[in-house]
Amino acid sequence: MRLGPRAPVPSRCVILTRPDGQSGALAAALQAEGIDSFAFPLLHIAAQADAAALAALDTALHDLSSYALAVFVSPNAVTHALSRLVFLKSGASAASLGAVTSGAAGAVASATVYWPVSLPVAVVGPGSAQALAEAGIAPPQHQVIVPPGGPDARFDSEALLAELDVAALAGRRVLIVRGDGGRELLADTLRAAGAQVDIVSAYTRRAPAPDSAAWAALEARLASSVPCAWVLTSSEAVRHLATMLAARYGTQEGVHTPGTPHVLAQILAAPCFTSHARIADAARAAGFDRITQCAAGDENLLAALKTWADPIQVKHDDR
């Protein structure tokens, strides 16, 4: 029997560490370039369940027209807050809320019906702007403020503050939607300028708990002949990784359990790619020393990973 041609074996593998279900677009882009990927989430995201936090979120969502500006700090903040808005305004069932927050396609599209057209929205980066657009909140009907892109782009609180007319918000209400915890720079700066800032939490972040099968799969990838690189997109996630590595490959009474020290050395010897100095610093503190910091945005991460995977071919393509 004649066999068809074999599928090419990827020459490189990228370990994607975003929360479960949030690496699909980058994985597909890597696959199109002949680069394999492996998901090893370092953050677990869930809808807010704390009664007090939900009450504060619901109060703000019921009173959106009283704000001069609403700020979403991440795509997760957009998705979970708008799904809650639809749930509150439409009388949706708890089951449909679960479908929305689990990422069902188009599930928050009706949020635009409930979002005041007069309320400007500010976001830290293009991922959040895209999440808003998928919910129907986008120019020209809605004003969306986002830091500009480009090779020197920064998608963080500092970049967003540079785009805001902070002085014009003095004496006015500003809503910041985020997860539990986070940086206070944005809120502190707005309050110092005289704004009345309300911070609400729409989702929770916590460390994942990979089971033995997930660790075994990661270790098998690292032990294979295909070189691996890490993509690290959150300093909090990197700190979770450092804690998990210490627990798995550290010592208890001088004995390494349950992993072995050479595997830890493999992990830390792998190159890693980040898009912000704070993430690079966290990676360095975790023990990585082959760190590439590229410009913000998945397109820049992809370009850097392509160069790592096949620098000769990339150079040829750029002629």
Image (cartoon, rainbow, N blue to C red):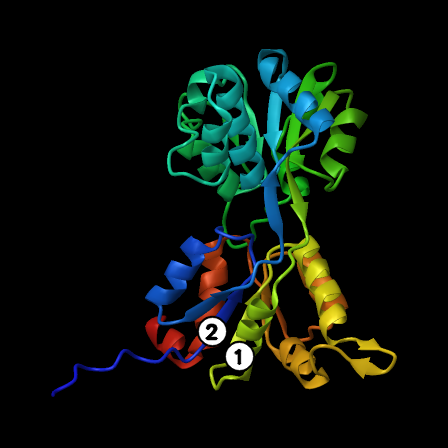
Quadrant containing the N terminus is: bottom left
Q: Position of residue 152 (x, y in %)?
A: 56, 53
User: Quarter of the image holding residue 72?
Assistant: top right
> Which residue is at 43% across, 55% downward?
24
Answer whether residue 168 is visible to the viewer in this image.
Answer: no
Q: Residues within 10 Å of mark 2 (few under 14, many from 20)?
A: many
Quadrant containing the C terminus is: bottom left
| Numbered circle sitting on residue 247 | none
* Outermost left residue: 1
Query: How far apart are the two marked residues, 1 and 2, measured between alpha carbons?
Result: 12 Å
> Which residue is at 53% across, 79% downward?
220
* Outermost right residue: 253
> Which residue is at 65% across, 24% downward?
57
Identity of the amino acid at label 2?
Answer: Cys
SS at badge 2: strand
Residue position for label 1: 220
SS at badge 1: helix
* Left or right for 228, reference 250: left
Residue position for label 2: 13
